[in-house]
Amino acid sequence: MTRPTVLICAGHDPSGGAGIQADIEAVAALGGHATTVITTLTDQDTSDVHATLTVDDTFFTRAVGTLCADMPPTAIKTGVLASVAQIERVCAIKHTHPDAPLVIDPVLAAAGGGRLADDSIGYALVRRLMPAADLVTPNLLEARRLTDADAGAETCAHELAELGTSALVTGGDTDDAVSVLATPAGDVTHFHHEQLAGGPFHGSGCTLASAIATQLAHGQPLNAAIESAAAYVHACLARADCPGHGQPLPERIQSC
Ligand code: PLP
């Protein structure tokens, strides 16, 4: 049987903890096939992002087109989107593949604090991409930046859901360990996670969003996809290790 294809548009983190490598590993571990178009290169270690280099817009647009003509996505997941043109391209792909659930991880900064997107990206995510999306997965800091409010997780989730997408405001690895899902219909679900020592973990947000996209690609309904993806992420974080001098990295693939 052919594995479902999850199209990932995201940045490269050379440490292997976050970004496209995290996405590929999570998709593969959950039985999907990741197709990948890189949005930005980063100079990064396990502590922080030090510099970024955005992929040329024309090249990005072309690569997405070539790939989707050959391998239509069953689901789409975005991480760092580094230009408004990249955001427009993802909107267009969702438009031509309306049945492919679109999961947006609105990455604005690395866990170490280094910025990965400026305000124009945040604005375009809110105005253009979120109304086309099925799910957006900000952490609380990102949700506050995107809604321009100093509100709690549930208020932020509702505000984002008003754009037409379900919104999962993730309770990080180390805070209160509750994630709040709000849907455009106004339904709210709380997901409780067991708290883990040793965080923040580098790449946990990427891992979760890619895991959810893969479970949606397998046909799971949204709440079940979040539950099963969260259980997978928890297992990855529980066996995280520290190959560098900074944050621990989730171990997404168990050796054979
Ligand atoms: N994508 C890239 C390319 C990154 O470099 C980072 C963070 O460092 C992220 C995404 C976000 O990672 P996290 O899952 O820790 O939020």
Image (spheres, rainbow, N blue to C red):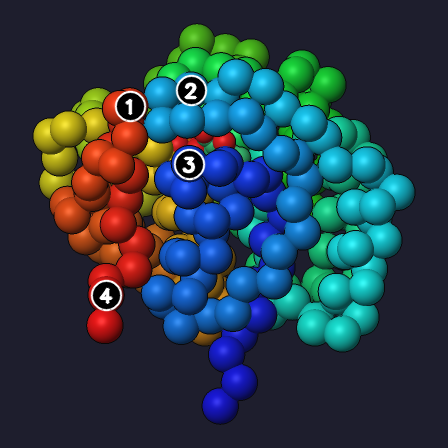
Q: Are marks 1 and 2 in contact (CB under 8 Å)?
A: yes
Q: Amino acid at mark 4?
A: Ser
- Considering the numbered disc 3 on the image, is that residue within a helix, a strand or a loop? loop
Q: Which residue is rendered at x = 49% and y = 21% of the image?
A: 49
Is there a contact, CB below 8 Å, between mark 4 and mark 3? no
Above or below residue 93? Residue 121 is above
| Vertical comparison of 155 with 210: above or below | above
Q: Is mark 2 within 8 Å of ligand 1?
A: yes
Q: Amino acid at mark 1?
A: Gly
Q: Which residue is mark 2?
A: 48
The residue carrying mark 4 is: 255
Tell me the amino acid under the disc marked 3.
Ser
The residues bearing labels 1 and 2 have C-alpha atoms spaced at a distance of: 8 Å
Q: CA distance from mark 1 to mark 3?
A: 10 Å
Residues at marks 1 and 4, CA–CA distance in whole angstroms: 23 Å
> Which amino acid lies under the numbered mark 2 shown in the image of this protein?
Asp
User: Label 1 belongs to which residue?
Assistant: 246
